[in-house]
Amino acid sequence: MGLKREVSKSVWSKSEKLQCGDHLIDIHVHPFLLKELTEKRPELLEGTKAYLGIKISPQPLETLVRQMEVAGVVKAVLLALDLTSKLGCKLPSNEEVAELVRMDPDRFIGFASVDPLQGQEAARQLEHAINELGLRGLKLHPPLQDFEPSDPKLRPVFKKSEELEIPILAHTGMTWQRSCILELSHPMLWDKVAMDFPDLKIILAHCGWPWAWDAAVLAMRHPNVYLDIANTYTGTPSEHLSLILTEMMPKRIVERFLADKLLFGSDFPYIELHKMAESVKKLPIADEVKLQILETNASKLLGLLL
Ligand SMILES: [Zn+2]
């Protein structure tokens, strides 16, 4: 505990006297290459290589925990990914995510994934994942799961998510995978869903880059739409984040319209948590807004008391 505090403080103090706490929440962590899972199910390695193009070696859960401590992250959302219909695999499954959460329930929150094209069956699986496995959100990936968000087949899953009061974290924006249709990840495809399900909280991942303005107007227009800042498509975490949040969208817009909508996410294992955290702290925006992005917005959204 003592070490955790010291490490966290030293990271904060590097970034020009920023008066932030050390209670960051990382809303976007992929556990598919954690050794605890790959050792039991080696197909995870093949699946991530084949469908996500990742060549990173598996790491023990302890590595993620250390990264959290160094970055001052106290809670991380672990995402399942159900690609059964299109690709015949789960990267990882709801049960595997639940198993990881059980290893350290103070630190981890699990989001389930279902194939939303399965309609009522998907809604049933989701209910099981939330009520029986203890997961607390839903992860969807339109291009990899090959669906359009406005497809009526998805309504049972959205309705069930609204009823269960869980947020949906949806991939939007760039994907390097050439085997799937990029257009399906356009953030504007969530406009109608946000209208039709006003109590459903929708997090548009990656700020929808390169359609960051489209994602931003949805967050401005709909009280139930949020944005996460995960990934660094165009360079270092700092380069990419400042491209989205101060070059594409000026500071004025970020501070005035998006302060309570932006959520910190790393996209681990692609990016080290502390590098993403540092890139937020370096942004030329108000300190209060950085605190909202790193901690408060997610704690409110997830109903956490930190
Ligand atoms: Zn991701």
Image: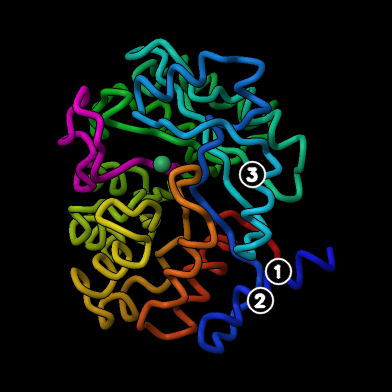
Q: How crowded is mark 2: few (under 14 residues within 10 Å), some or many (20 or more)?
A: few
Determine whether label 3 and label 1 are within 8 Å by CB.
no
In the rendered image, the vertical position of residue 220 relative to residue 175, given as above or below: below
- Contact check, label 2 and label 1, Cβ < 8 Å: yes
What is the distance, in whole Å, between disc 2 and disc 1 at their CAs?
5 Å
Q: Name the residue under label 1.
A: 7
Q: What element carries label 2?
A: helix
Instruction: Tell how many labels.
Output: 3
Q: For the residues marked 3 and 1, what is the alpha-carbon distance in whole angstroms?
A: 23 Å
- Considering depth in this image, is 161 or 297 the residue closer to the camera? 297
As helix, strand or loop, the secondary structure at mark 1 comes to helix
Colour logic: rainbow
Q: Quadrant of the C terminus?
A: bottom right
Amino acid type at image mark 3:
Ile
Residue ID for mark 2:
10
Name which of mark 3 and mark 1 comes first in the sequence: 1
Q: Quadrant of ligand 1?
A: top left
Q: Which residue position holds label 3?
A: 109
Q: Which residue is drawn at 65% across and 19% down?
A: 39
Q: What residue type is labelled 1?
A: Val
- Which quadrant of the structure image shows residue 118? top left
Tell me the amino acid under the disc marked 2. Answer: Ser
From the top left corner, tell me how far across and down residue 94 is, in percent: 58, 25
Whole-Å distance between the Cαs marked 3 and 2?
Answer: 26 Å
* Picture residue at 32% right of the left edge, 14% below the top: 86
Tag 3–tag 2 contact (CB < 8 Å): no
Q: What stretch is highlighted in magenta?
A: 168-189
173 in the magenta segment: yes
